[in-house]
Image (cartoon, rainbow, N blue to C red):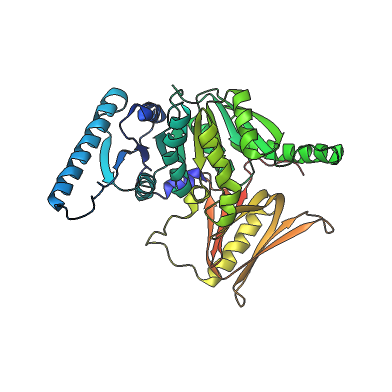
């Protein structure tokens, strides 16, 4: 899936570094250089300056322009000196005026940044609270993953904790973390059940639930670590997600916390925003956050002009052929709703087939047991705009993406099949 997405982009995706030229950003510059070892990727360095405040009353605009020109030169000089010490003189530096978070997010989108690297605040209470607000705001508006680097991180992360809720965003966040991890790094997938163990809740419920979660964590581990390059552990916690994850990070002495978000809708902010805010403000370590939009980034590339427009007949044949090739494979089904964000609707079921009905302009995806009396799940999709099959480099199907007026439905197959 990753290889296919990168193949669709005509130029290597940029690594964007946002810096204010102060020691707060030193670790971000130093780590970004390590991330580029062996990579041919464009690097952009951005520093953002607030517009000069205009005093009340008449003001000479030429004085304001001269003042802003001075701010621009000062910011560029700081960033240049920082790159001379810690980065690469060949990296391009750009200075923009505006709101820091929105400006960084806009350039990340323009440059199709694979990842945005920023620094975190200091370790005093005030510095930690106020210095991290830019990183937190950026994580809320960015469509690219954001790596906020703590000053204590002196090399590639070796102890990584991933907050895993089995959404596509959290799985892709874990996958990205493995890409930037040090060789032989230890990764712990942590799932938090938002309940406390109470006497009135039967103990067998917890055991059954933990067994189910454990099976899901094992399945994700298989997807992430096919080449066995990393040691991946699993952990199930109970309680409020934010404090539980922070305590676990302390216990594991993690140097990187990883999480995905659930989108920008109201539900997404409730489920994801509060926990991410607690991690960024409360953690004394680096944080990598992958927004839900980034999990679908590989499937949102504009169609090349040479590609013919699909017609309804093509959709019927595409889904018929896709069904013949992939019937019986296990996968996960995620729906990306514009209002609610990305949500996993099903995981682990076997794909039985898909059909498109031209008169009703509706497609059906069918999952479940291969037995006649086994459980089944049917997903209906109306008002379809496009049907796209995404393939691995070896030609096998990796995913099916169906866009409609209601959003996007994504079927992603497990890369490691399990016995039924």
The residue lying at 56 percent from left, 65 percent from top is 406
Horizontal and vertical percent position of residue 322: 61, 58
Residue at 78% in and 54% down: 370
User: What residue is rendered at 79% in x and 36% in y?
Assistant: 197
Q: Residue at x 16, y 53 (%)?
A: 59
Does the image show residue 29? no
Q: With 88 as the anchor, is 274 left or right in this view?
A: right
Picture quadrant of residue 306: bottom left
| Horizontal arrangement in the rendering, residue 284 relative to residue 100 (left or right) | right
Residue 175 higher or lower than 55, as above or below? above
Percent of width and height locating residue 303: 42, 59
**Quarter of the C terminus within the rendering:** top right
State the residue in front, 294 or 223. 294
Relative side of 11 to 146, left or right: left
**Farthest residue, direction front:** 57
Nearer to the camera, 141 or 225: 141
């Amino acid at each position: 899936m990753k290889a296919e997405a990168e193949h669709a982009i005509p130029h290597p995706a940029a690594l964007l570094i946002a810096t204010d030229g102060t020691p707060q950003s030193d670790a971000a510059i130093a780590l970004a250089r390590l991330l580029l070892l062996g990579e041919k990727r464009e690097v952009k360095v951005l520093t953002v300056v607030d517009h000069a405040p205009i005093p009340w009353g008449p003001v000479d605009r030429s004085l304001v322009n001269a003042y802003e020109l001075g701010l621009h030169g000062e910011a560029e000089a700081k960033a240049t000196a920082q790159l001379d010490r810690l980065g690469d003189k060949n990296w391009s530096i750009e200075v923009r005026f505006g709101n820091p978070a929105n400006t960084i997010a806009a350039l990340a989108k323009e440059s199709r940044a694979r990842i945005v690297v920023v620094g975190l605040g200091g370790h005093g209470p005030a510095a930690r609270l106020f210095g991290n607000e830019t990183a937190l705001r950026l994580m809320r508006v960015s469509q690219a993953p954001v790596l906020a680097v703590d000053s204590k991180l002196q090399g590639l992360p070796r102890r990584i904790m991933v907050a895993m809720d089995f959404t596509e965003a959290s799985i892709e966040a874990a996958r990205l973390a493995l890409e930037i991890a040090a060789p032989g790094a230890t990764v712990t997938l942590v799932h938090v059940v938002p309940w406390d163990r109470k006497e009135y809740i039967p103990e067998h419920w917890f055991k059954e639930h933990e067994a189910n979660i454990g099976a899901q964590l094992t399945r994700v581990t298989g997807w992430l670590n096919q080449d066995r390059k990393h040691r991946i552990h699993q952990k199930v916690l109970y309680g409020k997600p934010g404090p539980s994850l922070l305590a676990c990070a302390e216990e594991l002495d993690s140097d990187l916390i990883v999480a995905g978000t659930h989108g920008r809708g109201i539900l997404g902010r409730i489920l994801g925003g509060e926990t991410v805010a607690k991690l960024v403000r409360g953690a004394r370590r680096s944080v990598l956050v992958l927004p839900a939009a980034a999990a679908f980034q590989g499937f949102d590339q504009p169609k090349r002009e040479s590609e013919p427009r699909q017609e309804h007949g093509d959709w019927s044949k595409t889904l018929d052929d896709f069904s013949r090739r992939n019937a019986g494979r296990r996968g996960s089904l995620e729906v990306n709703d514009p209002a609610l964000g990305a949500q996993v609707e099903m995981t682990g079921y076997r794909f039985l087939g898909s059909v498109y009905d031209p008169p009703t302009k509706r497609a059906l995806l069918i999952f479940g047991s291969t037995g006649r009396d086994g459980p089944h799940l049917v997903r209906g999709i109306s008002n379809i705009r496009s049907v796209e099959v995404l393939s691995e480099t070896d030609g096998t199907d990796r995913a099916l993406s169906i866009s409609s007026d209601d959003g996007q439905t994504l079927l992603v197959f497990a890369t490691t099949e399990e016995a039924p």
